[in-house]
Every structure is written in C-alpha cells, then in structure tokens.
C-alpha cells in the first residue's frame, strides 16, 4: 500500500511541473498590463516603467520563470499586487474557508443523495424514484446564486432564522485560534461554544446551497450504478441463495455500486472547491474562489498562479485518496499498484 | 415417476410485461422432478428453459410474473408462498448454479465470506460451531485444493472452473433437496466441464438430491440425466427417459435438435434438417455444391494433393514464439498476500515455438483449451499482434516482419481476414448490416460509388444467405445466425485467401451452428479460400477441417488429418480432450433419425 502511494505521488510530479509552466505562461499571456494597473490611471509613463522594473517584468521571460520557480521552491508564491499581501498567506487563510464550506455541503449532500439514490434504484417507478428525479433535476437546473439568494431571502430576510450572510462569523464573535483553519473544529478545540454556534449558523445556508447543487450528480450516479449492479448476476445468485434483502442490497449491491459514486464525489468536490465563486460572493465568504476571480479581473498574476497551483496539488491529493479508497473497496484495483 | 414428486410444475405460464405488450415466455409447462432424480431441460435460446427455473425459485425479474398454473415444491405452493417463506426456501431447500461462474460471484467479496453469508442466513448458530469452518468444509467438498487458503481468495484470483466449484459449494452449503443448474458448464473447457459435471453428479447422488440440469447440449443431458424435457418457444414439446429420447425421439423439434448436434460419424450435411439438407445457399453453383455435399473435404475438387498450387503452402509458420513479460499481476499478488514468488522464469511463453503450414484451399483446425495459445497464434498470423520471434510466411511473402500497426493499410490485409467469436460484439452497433459488410471494401477495396458498393453488398449477402431486406437493419434487429452471416460476408468481401475463424459458432445455438458451418464449407469450396479454424470443440473442428493441430501450453502436441486425430489420437492430452466430450448416444440410432 505504501509503495502504491509513493508511486502515485511520483506520477504526480510531472503533472505538477506541467502546471507550473502552463500557469506561468498563461498568466503572462493575460490581457492587461499589471504594471499599468498597479500604477493607476494617472501615472506617467516613467512611473509605469519604474514599477515594471520593480516587479521584474522587464526581464526576459525565461529569467522571470527561473526566479518564479526559485521562489516557489522556497514556499514563496509572490505578493499580491492589489493587496500587497503574500499570496501564500492569503491562500492559507482562505483555503480552509472554502474547504470547510465545500466539505460540509458535500457531507449534507451525500447523506441525502446516496440513500435517495439507493431507495430510488430498489423501487424503480415508485414515488421515491420520482421524488429523486424531481429533486435532482431541480438541483442542477437552478443556478447556485439563485438558490443561495432564495435561501437568504427566506431564512434571513423573511423568517430571520439565520444570521446576515456576511462571512464566516457574525461581527460580535472573534475568530478562534487557528489550528486546522476549520472554524467548526477550531472553536471546539478552543471550547468556545458561542463561536461554534455562530460559525455553524453562518455555514448552514451556503452549505445547503452547495448541497442542493451537488445532490443531483451524486444521487443520479448512485441510482444508475445501483440499478446496474442490482441487475447483475451475482446479485441474482445472492437472491437465489435466500440472503435477506438487506444483505443483498448493502453487502452485495451497494459496495459494488460505490465505485463510480466515489469517482463522481471526487469530481464534484474538486469542482465545488474552486468553482463556487458565486456562492462565496452571495454569502460574502472569504474563500479561495472569489479571491482568484478578483485577482484575475485585476491582472494580478501572482494570486492566480498560486490559486491554480494550489488547486493542482489538491487535485493530485484528492485523486490519491480516491485511488486508496478504490483499493479498499475493490480488491482488483490493488493489483495494479 | 413416484407418487409424490419433489417438484411439480403444472400448467405453468410466465408472462413478461414489455414495452410491446405482454410476452408469454413460458406457456402451459408441466414438469415434475422425483426425489433423487436428475432431469435435463434441453432447448435453444429463447425456449424458456431458464425462465421456468426462475419461476420455480420465484426470482423472476420485476417485469415477469407467474400468470397461470401451479408450482409445488415438497408440499409448498411456491406461487402462494410469502416472500419470507420463499427466502427461507432459496438456498436451503432449492438452490441454483448459474452460467458464467465468475459473474455469479460478488467480485469484491472473499469467496469464503460469500459461502458464509449463505450459511449464516440458513443455519442457526447453535447447530454449527463455526460458520467459517463450515464454509471451508464446503470448499473442501467441491475438491478445491488448499481450501483454508482459498477461503480468502477473491473470484478474480480463481480460474473459471474454480469459480464454478465455489458456486457449487455455495449452492450445496445448506444441503438443499433440489439443485437447479442453469448451463453450469457453458464457457468452460471440455475437460473442466467434465470435472465440474462429475462433481455435481457425485455430490448430488451422495446426498440423494434431485437435480435439474438446464442445457442446450444434448450430449451433456444424455450423459448425466435420467430424464429429458425438450422445450421449444416456451412450450414443452417432449418428455421422456434419457435413453428413450435419444433412441426414439418423437417430436420433429427434438429430431431437428439431435440432427444438428455435431457428433462422431456424421458429416456436415447430416446436421441440417432433412428438408434443408440439399440447398443451403441460394445462387450456389450446383456442381460445386454437389461436390462438397457428398464429400469428405479432402475430395474437394480444389484441394488436389500434389497440384501445382498446393506444392507451396499458403501460410507457413515456423518456430513462432510469443512471450509476455511476467510482471505486475502475479508478482504483486504474491507480495500482497505473502505468498512465495512463482518459480517460473521471468517471461511467460504464450506460444512456444510452433511450426505449421496451411495449403491452398485447405482448412486447418487449431484446437486447445483456454490459455493454450491458440488465440495468440491466430492473432499473430492475423497481424494483430507482434511475435517475439519466428517466421510467418504468407503466399511466399514474409509478413512476420510487418508491424501490426502498419499491416492494416497494406494490400496484404485484404488477403487475410477474420470471422470473430461473438457475432454481436464484433459488429458496430451503429452500422447497418450493409455498412458493416461494405466497411472493408471502403477501407481497402477498389469498388467506388454508392451503387457499385451496394451491388457488391447484395452479392455478398446472397452468397452468405442473408435476405437483402435485412441489409438495412442494425445488429440488434438481427438474430444470432443473421449476425454471424454478416460477419462472414464482411470477412469474404475482399476475396481473402485465408480466413481465420475464431470460434465462429461458439455463441450460436446448435441448429444455427449447423447452418453456419455448412455455409462456411460451401463458401470455401466456391471461393477457394483456406481456413484457420480456432476452436476448443473437437467435434465441430472435425466437421469443417481437413487437418487438426492440437495445442497445449503454447506447444503443438499433435497434428494430423481430422479423421486420424479424432479416431486414433496419439497424444494423451488429445485423448483426454476427446473423452471429456459428452456424446449423445446418437450415432447408433442414425436410422431412426432418417439420416
């Protein structure tokens, strides 16, 4: 198992190098002149030129690249042009916010979607099956900003059950000392129940928004995969051996049906992590997605590079986890390690 | 028949609700099985034999239901029983063995655990000390070596025969009274088939169990069963004692089925129903047809020994070797499970230095069990696979040096063609029959223009006996036999000199197989092609081939004329293969079949 993980990580190295090169070139090819943007509209030509020199943008591309990789090797992602903050620190602050939100949304979604998919598959054509179909169709067809806004309107504005959608904590609560970066966990470690409640109540609406959106692929995949497995010959054998329906569905069908669902899960997770900008915007969430988009708009290439690199690393790690999970579930996969 | 049969099926009708309305898969079927009796249900695909058994177990699909009739199992009304009662019955009183053992086992669960699941369901904890021990015992009884170790194996780590033994262990774990075996040996090698069938019979006889053997193979039914039920299109057409039914079949369908079964002492033409025995192909030159009809193939006019064409063989293969590096799978497996590494050398020789030749107009059978290297050999000759070393000479030209990737675009490609094993899988589901047949012509042929192409397709369709109105259908709208014809038409579209037939009839019913084999024989005579017929079935090979090559573990163990190899085998392995084939006692009674 350890050799498999090691091998996997080795395979990831070339793709990471590729990502470094491509992001570097792409950010340089972005339209707009960062020096001009940084200098402001009123700056003179000389001032812009000076800034360009300061940023190292006057050097040949290859030299810029080596400087960039050298910095990367020292954990330096560069500084943001707009905020002046080091990118690494910003990402370190913002990634847990996104991850916490995405994970919670995904957990909610899985807890609902998988049982729904399984039940729909075992009772095709029943009201549960139709419910599954309607829910999933609604889930994907409503854009996340719309569901987010509706939730805010109903639960904050109308009913007043949830707090104002303004970030991870309400204004009166101070952030817990950072351990994991996940407020739900950090507040518990700090035994600050008040802050925990505040963090949770801030999380519920955006997490629900994400859950509604990600429900669809997971439930659909579970249903389809369960249907295929239930029609397979070994399930027939299990039924012909008189095994109880629970054993047949859980031990025989469900475990086999999980393989494609896990793949879907990983895709949904990585998609949500980087792409839920709209949700982050609606709920003023200090996440990594909105950070990257803002940087992109202002031609601020250091954060964009940092973001893409971070996502690439996340992807590699996520795929590793999925592979390990696959190996745990399916003995046939272990061979190929 | 005893007064009170163990299983009594009366007037059973099973309906399936489909999009096109209600389909009656089984109609008014009466079957009874006495205690300790072995009954065969014989029929071709679509005869309803499997559906009948599913109805007995009440494991029909959601769409299926028992519409009429009654199923009584040792006094229990199966139709009226609750689902809980049925579940208690399944596996404990009635159990089932399925076709394709590998698919019948949960791929990601240890086989021992799967047996234990059944034991846990049906046997009280108080009655056995340890379910695990009982499962190991069950594995031991199906003669699996080192059962304690195999308990922890996953299905993919076991061979097909071994998997079927596990399925049998699973079915017999709770000592049921009735075992239903649905095509238990289809897809297994003949020697494995014999071992598995012997095992089933031995175990069921010892426990005085009743058995229903569902099969399409008359030989198997004759060799292992007391009584035979013949089904056709959802109805029972004949029921009789095994000895009687072969001596004196009553129903025309039974007779047809028996005629179509390849067996000793008959020629290809004998397989066809009497009324069809003469013309197989429309538009066939009567002279050639006649010649091939009353003939052992060596008398075929085109295969004259010593003729100027045959002096040089069409295909010459010398010291052909294919090695695969032995890494990954077995080594990692060994490491993972702490087993000692295999003692074999690093490279695995799938084909180990074989030499043979095929003359012009000759058909050669390449016979052996799975893993013997016959398919690898045919792939190398076909230039779909590179050989490790050795010479392949085709029509005086060394084709062994041409890389498979570039061979596809060379003119030689058109001279070696192939008919594949599965007629369904080898056709593009999005191509019509005409498009499939035209495909090689469009790639390599010289016929251009829509109308010319269509004309050629129709000509080919006529040759293989495919009605022209079927040419615009898609594969799923064609029957198995029709798809086989499309595959053959495609293979002969470019006037090949050598056609490699890779078990072309393995997926077909016997009556369809008989027609397809005859068609292949006629085409060979008419077009002067040579065949390399790859098969595991000696009986079928004998019918079509002049010479037979028997392969085992990558080597040729015996080679000679078909008659000689089959009637007087020299090698022990060939003898083993031959004795493993179950023969229906038909040849004695050929007169009664009107042959």
Image (tube, helix red, strand yellow):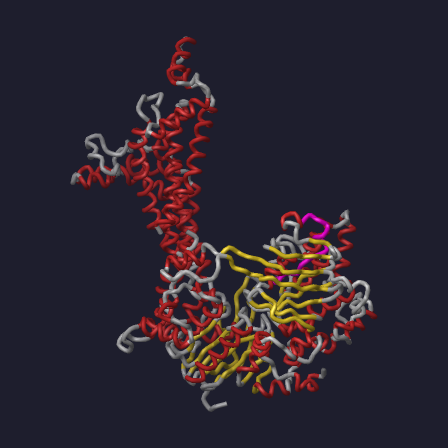
Confirm whether the magenta stretch covers residue B97.
Answer: no
Part of the protein shown in magenta: B408-422
Of residues B16 and B457, the one drawn nearer to the viewer in this rendering:
B457
In this picture, is A216 found above or below B179? above
Asked if residue B30 lies left or right of residue B336, the reply is right
- Give residue B13's position: percent from left, percent from top: 53, 75
Identify the residue at horizontal 71%, vertical 84% (top origin): B594
Q: Classify residue B21 by image quadrant.
A: bottom right
Query: In the rendered image, is residue A171 in sight?
Result: yes
- For the point 56% across and 80% down, which residue is it? B221
Outermost left residue: A191
Picture layout, residue B222 above or below residue A50 = below
Q: Is residue B91 above or below residue A134?
A: below
Name the residue at 36% across, 21% down.
A81
Q: Is residue B234 visible?
A: no
Q: Nearer the viewer, residue B312 or B131?
A: B312
Give whichever of B388, B512 is nearer the camera.
Answer: B388
């Amino acid at each position: 198992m350890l050799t498999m993980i090691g091998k996997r990580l080795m395979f990831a190295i070339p793709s990471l190098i590729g990502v470094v090169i491509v992001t570097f070139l792409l950010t340089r090819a972005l339209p707009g002149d960062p020096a001009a943007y940084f200098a402001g509209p009123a700056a003179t030509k000389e001032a812009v030129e000076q800034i360009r020199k300061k940023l190292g943008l006057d050097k040949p591309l290859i030299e810029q690249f080596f400087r960039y990789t050298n910095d990367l090797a020292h954990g330096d992602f560069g500084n943001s042009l707009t905020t002046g903050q080091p990118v690494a620190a910003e990402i370190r602050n913002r990634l847990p916010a996104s991850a916490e939100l995405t994970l919670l949304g995904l957990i909610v979604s899985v807890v609902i979607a998988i049982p729904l998919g399984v039940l729909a598959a075992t009772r095709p054509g029943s009201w549960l099956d139709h419910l599954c179909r309607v829910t999933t169709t609604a889930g994907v067809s409503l854009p996340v900003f719309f569901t987010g806004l509706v939730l805010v309107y109903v639960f904050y504005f109308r009913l007043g059950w949830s707090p104002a959608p303004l970030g991870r904590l309400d204004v009166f609560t101070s952030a817990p000392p950072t351990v994991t970066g996940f407020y739900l966990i950090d507040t518990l470690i700090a035994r600050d129940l008040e802050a925990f409640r505040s963090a949770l109540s801030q999380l519920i609406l955006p997490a629900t928004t994400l859950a509604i959106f990600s429900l669809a692929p997971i439930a659909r995949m579970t249903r389809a995969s369960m249907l295929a497995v239930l029609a397979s010959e070994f399930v027939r054998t299990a039924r012909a051996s008189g095994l109880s329906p629970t054993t047949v569905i859980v031990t025989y069908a469900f475990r086999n049906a999980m393989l494609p669902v896990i793949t879907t899960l990983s895709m949904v997770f990585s998609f949500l992590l980087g792409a839920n900008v709209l949700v982050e915007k609606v709920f003023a969430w200090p996440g990594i997605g909105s950070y990257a988009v803002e940087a992109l708009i202002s031609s601020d290439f250091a954060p964009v590079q940092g973001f893409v690199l971070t996502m690439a690393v996340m992807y590699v790690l996520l795929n590793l986890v999925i592979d390990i999970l696959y190996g745990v579930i399916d003995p046939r996969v272990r061979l190929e390690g | 028949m005893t007064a009170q049969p163990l299983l009594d099926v009366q007037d059973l009708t099973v309906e399936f609700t489909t999009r096109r309305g209600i389909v009656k898969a089984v109609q008014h079927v009466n079957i009874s099985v006495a205690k300790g009796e072995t009954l065969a249900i014989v029929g071709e695909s679509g005869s309803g034999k499997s559906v009948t058994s599913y109805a007995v177990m009440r494991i029909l699909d959601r769409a299926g239901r028992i519409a009429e009739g009654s199923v009584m199992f040792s006094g229990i009304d199966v139709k009226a029983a609750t689902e809980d009662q049925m579940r208690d019955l399944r596996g404990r009183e009635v159990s089932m063995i399925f076709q394709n053992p590998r698919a019948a086992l949960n791929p990601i669960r240890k086989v021992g655990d799967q047996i234990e699941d059944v034991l846990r369901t049906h046997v009280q904890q108080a009655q056995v000390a340890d379910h695990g021990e009982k499962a190991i015992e069950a594995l031991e009884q199906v003669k699996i070596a080192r059962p304690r170790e195999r308990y922890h194996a996953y299905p993919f780590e076991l061979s097909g025969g071994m998997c079927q033994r596990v399925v049998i262990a699973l079915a017999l774990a709770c000592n049921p009274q009735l075992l239903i075996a649905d095509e238990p040996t289809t897809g297994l090698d003949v020697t494995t088939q014999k071992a598995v069938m012997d095992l089933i019979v031995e175990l069921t006889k010892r426990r005085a169990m009743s058995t229903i053997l569902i099969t399409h193979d008359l030989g198997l039914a004759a060799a292992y069963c007391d009584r035979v039920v013949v089904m056709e299109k959802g109805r029972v057409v004949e029921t009789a004692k095994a000895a009687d039914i072969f001596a004196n079949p009553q129903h025309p369908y039974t007779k047809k089925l028996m005629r179509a079964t390849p067996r000793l002492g008959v020629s290809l033409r004998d397989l066809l129903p009497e009324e069809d025995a003469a013309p197989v192909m429309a538009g066939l030159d009567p002279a050639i047809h006649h010649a091939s009809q009353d003939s052992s193939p060596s008398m075929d006019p085109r295969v004259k020994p010593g003729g100027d064409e045959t002096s040089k063989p069409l295909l010459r293969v010398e010291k052909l070797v294919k090695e695969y590096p032995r890494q990954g799978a077995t080594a990692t497996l060994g490491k993972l499970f702490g087993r000692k590494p295999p003692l074999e050398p690093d490279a695995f020789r799938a084909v180990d230095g074989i030499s043979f030749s095929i003359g012009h107009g000759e058909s050669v059978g390449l016979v052996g069990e799975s893993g013997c290297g016959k398919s690898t050999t045919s792939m190398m000759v076909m230039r779909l696979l590179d050989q490790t070393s050795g010479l392949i000479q085709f029509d005086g030209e060394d084709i062994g040096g041409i890389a498979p990737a570039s061979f596809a675009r060379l003119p030689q490609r058109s001279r070696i063609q192939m008919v594949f094993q599965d007629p369904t899988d080898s056709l593009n589901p999005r191509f019509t029959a005409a498009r499939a047949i035209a495909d090689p012509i469009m790639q390599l042929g010289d016929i251009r223009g829509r109308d010319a192409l269509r004309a050629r397709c129709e000509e080919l369709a006529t040759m293989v006996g495919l009605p022209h109105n079927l040419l615009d259908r898609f594969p799923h709208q064609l029957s198995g036999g029709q798809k086989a014809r499309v595959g053959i038409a495609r293979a002969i579209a470019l006037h090949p000199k050598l056609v490699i037939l890779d078990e072309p009839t393995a997926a077909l019913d016997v009556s369809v197989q008989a027609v397809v084999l005859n068609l292949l024989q006629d085409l060979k005579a008419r077009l002067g092609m040579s065949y390399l017929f790859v098969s595991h079935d000696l009986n079928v090979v004998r019918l079509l081939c002049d010479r037979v090559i028997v392969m085992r573990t990558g080597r040729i163990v015996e080679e000679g004329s078909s008659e000689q190899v089959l009637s007087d085998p020299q090698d022990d392995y060939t003898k083993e293969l031959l004795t493993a084939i179950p023969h229906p006692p038909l040849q004695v009674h050929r007169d009664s079949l009107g042959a």
